[in-house]
């Protein structure tokens, strides 16, 4: 089966929202594997070493996901309500800033994992812990 046929088959079987959730969950899990060690590292050099051993790749994938999402949200024919689109674009910009700060060894990973996990849960239809606690 060709790649194009495989991609078409996935689109026919899985809704775009489910694909987004699956991809974001996988990327978040990749980031999460490094989060505890990165956040506990006492030196910038130790954090940069963790980045070099896989975290940087996972962060780059996450940034690609959010850039694609941001582009899609900015399209005129996007059907999401304008307020939700604006909120998600703002979140994408935060993810970009946070990822850059992590890449420079200056920020923690846990807040990024928390946000991306909440978005993935939202795509699945599960309320986030923050939403439940705020209710």
Image (spheres, rainbow, N blue to C red):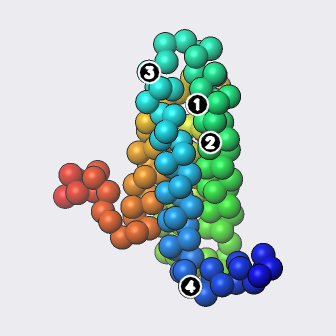
Label 3: which residue?
A: 40
User: Upstream in the sequence, badge 2 or badge 1?
Assistant: 2
Mark 3 or mark 4, whichever is nearer to me: 4
Task: Give the distance between the C-alpha atoms of the residues marked 2 and 1, in whole angstroms.
Answer: 9 Å
User: Upstream in the sequence, badge 3 or badge 4?
Assistant: 4
Image coordinates of residue 114 in percent, x first then y, are 41, 45
Instruction: Confirm or deny contact between disc 2 and disc 1 (CB under 8 A).
Output: yes
Q: Residues within 10 Å of mark 3 (few under 14, many from 20)?
A: few
User: Which disc number belongs to residue 13?
Assistant: 4
Task: Give the distance between the C-alpha atoms of the residues marked 1 and 3, in whole angstroms.
Answer: 13 Å
Residue with the most extreme front position: 1
- Residue nearer the viewer, 106 or 121: 121
Label 1: which residue?
A: 102
Image coordinates of residue 88 in percent, x first then y, are 52, 59
- Residue nearer the viewer, 89 or 67: 67
In the image, 67: left or right of 16?
right
Task: Give the distance between the C-alpha atoms of the residues marked 3 and 4, in whole angstroms.
Answer: 41 Å
Residue at 51% of width from left, 34% of height from top? 34
User: Which disc number belongs to residue 59?
Assistant: 2
User: Upstream in the sequence, badge 4 or badge 1?
Assistant: 4
Is label 3 in a helix, a strand or a loop? Answer: helix
User: Upstream in the sequence, badge 1 or badge 3?
Assistant: 3
């Amino acid at each position: 089966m060709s790649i194009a046929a495989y991609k078409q088959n996935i689109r026919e079987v899985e809704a775009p929202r489910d694909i987004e959730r699956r991809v974001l969950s996988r990327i978040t899990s990749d980031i999460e594997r490094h989060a505890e060690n990165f956040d506990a590292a006492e030196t910038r050099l130790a954090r940069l070493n963790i980045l070099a051993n896989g975290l940087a790749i996972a962060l780059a994938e996450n940034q690609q996901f959010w850039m694609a999402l941001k582009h899609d949200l900015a399209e005129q024919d996007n059907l999401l309500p304008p307020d939700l689109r604006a909120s998600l674009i703002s979140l994408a910009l935060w993810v970009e800033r946070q990822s850059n700060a992590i890449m420079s060894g200056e920020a923690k990973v846990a807040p990024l994992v928390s946000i991306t996990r909440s978005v993935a849960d939202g795509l699945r239809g599960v309320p986030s812990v923050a939403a439940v606690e705020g209710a």
